[in-house]
């Protein structure tokens, strides 16, 4: 294994929030106002999110997991993707909703949906930022955490959409999330359930966002288009370097409405590659560590696509502040490791 010394200043992390002086000023303004909890800035953020993302209503909450928990709490049953992050399973268990896992992950989009249950609510995660409109049905709950700002045809919008604003997502509030909907009654129900001061529902909890977080989110939202453009430019550098090396391009390239929330490809001996990239001062992640149904699946639930994605996917650094120079360093190092 190659061992290279790299200074801390040269280290390239896998993820990094993009914070500027305008973000800091927005948060400082709220801090000096004396109104820190859920108030007028949260309402302003909700209105801006609904307008920018093309939904009638937006309800901001304390995290993406909280958003999913509130949505799941209104359901009797939901189909979950097996190839997805653990927070989805945590939300379903917290909401005490009955669930099962979709049997297959789509080999082209890396998304899974409950196509065999047309009347059942299913959670469609826009995996790594991939938008496959054909998988969106009227009962679909979309997780747009990694596809925030992507073009989703209005006619293909599902029942509800959620997103996380964690520190390293498409825009960040530190923590925070949102539930997007087109139905006033559903929006009002989420608002009532995110505040437990006046108990009305069995699954109410304190899931409110703060004005401090909302101020950061508002400032970040104004730069969402530039964030998307910067991520696309980095992806272009990566794609041009690997397309003639026998590697499969990320699924975003097969679905033109997609964005690059993550840049994930399949490589042989993924764990060795990550170690050698780290030795070069570059931190790489993975797509998903293991299927959500790993501990409970039977032979009928085995899916070769899901297993391959979990075993072979590597996630390269892609965030707005990475820049062209560092992006070229990342992809050059990867190709050296893969020789």
Image (spheres, helix red, strand yellow):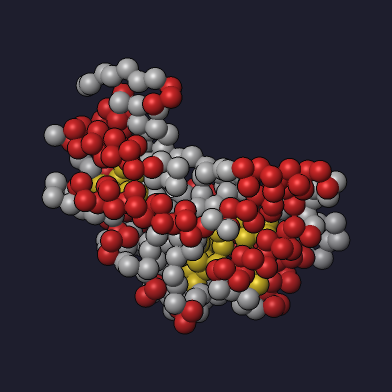
Query: In this view of the protein, which residue sits in the foreground, 36 or 92?
Result: 36
- Above or below, 273 against 61 in this view is above
Residue 330 percent location from the top left of the image: 30, 37
Residue 260 percent location from the top left of the image: 39, 55
Residue 317 percent location from the top left of the image: 38, 41
Examine the rendering and report whether any part of residue 164 can be seen. no
Examine the rendering and report whether any part of residue 45 can be seen. yes
Query: In this view of the protein, which residue sits in the foreground, 233 or 62?
Result: 233
Residue 261 percent location from the top left of the image: 42, 53
Direction from residue 283 to residue 120 in the image, left or right: right
| Residue at position x 37%, y 68% in the image | 257
Q: How many marks?
A: 0
For the C terminus, the quadrant is top left
- Above or below, 102 against 329 in this view is below
The answer to which image quadrant residue 106 occupies is bottom left
| Residue at position x 32%, y 60% in the image | 252
The answer to which image quadrant residue 105 occupies is bottom left
| Residue at position x 50%, y 66% in the image | 142
For the N terminus, the quadrant is top left
* Residue found at the far bottom of this picture: 155
Direction from residue 339 to residue 191 in the image, left or right: right
| Residue at position x 37%, y 75% in the image | 134
Direction from residue 50 to residue 193 in the image, left or right: right
């Amino acid at each position: 294994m190659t061992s290279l010394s790299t200074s801390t200043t040269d280290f390239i992390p896998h993820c990094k929030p993009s914070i500027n002086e305008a973000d800091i000023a927005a948060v400082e303004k709220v801090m000096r106002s004396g109104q820190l909890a859920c108030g007028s800035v949260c309402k302003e953020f909700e209105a801006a999110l609904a307008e920018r993302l093309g939904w009638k209503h937006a309800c901001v909450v304390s995290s993406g997991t909280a958003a999913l928990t509130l949505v799941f709490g209104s359901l009797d049953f939901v189909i979950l993707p097996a190839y997805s992050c653990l927070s989805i399973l945590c939300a379903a268990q917290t909401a005490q909703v009955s669930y099962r896992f979709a049997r297959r992950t789509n080999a082209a989009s890396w998304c899974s949906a409950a196509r065999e249950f047309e009347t059942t609510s299913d959670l469609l995660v826009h995996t790594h930022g991939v938008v496959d409109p054909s998988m969106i049905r009227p009962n679909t709950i979309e997780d747009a955490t990694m596809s925030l700002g992507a073009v989703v045809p209005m006619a293909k919008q599902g029942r509800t959409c959620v997103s996380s604003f964690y520190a390293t997502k498409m825009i960040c509030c530190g923590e925070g999330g949102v539930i997007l909907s087109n139905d006033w009654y559903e929006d009002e129900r989420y608002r009532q359930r995110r505040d437990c001061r006046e108990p009305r529902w069995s699954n109410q909890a304190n899931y409110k966002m703060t004005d401090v977080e909302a101020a950061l989110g508002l400032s970040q939202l104004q730069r969402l288009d530039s964030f998307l453009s910067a991520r696309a430019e980095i992806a272009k550098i990566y794609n041009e370097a690997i397309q003639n090396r026998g590697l499969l391009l990320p699924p975003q390239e097969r679905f033109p409405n997609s964005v690059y929330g993550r840049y994930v490809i399949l490589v042989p001996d993924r764990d060795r590659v990550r170690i050698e990239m780290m030795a070069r001062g570059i931190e790489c992640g993975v797509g998903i560590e293991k299927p959500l149904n790993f501990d409970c699946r039977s032979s009928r639930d085995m899916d070769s696509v899901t297993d391959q994605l979990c075993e072979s996917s590597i996630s390269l650094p892609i965030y707005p502040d990475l820049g062209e120079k560092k992006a070229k360093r990342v992809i050059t190092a990867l190709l050296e490791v893969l020789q």
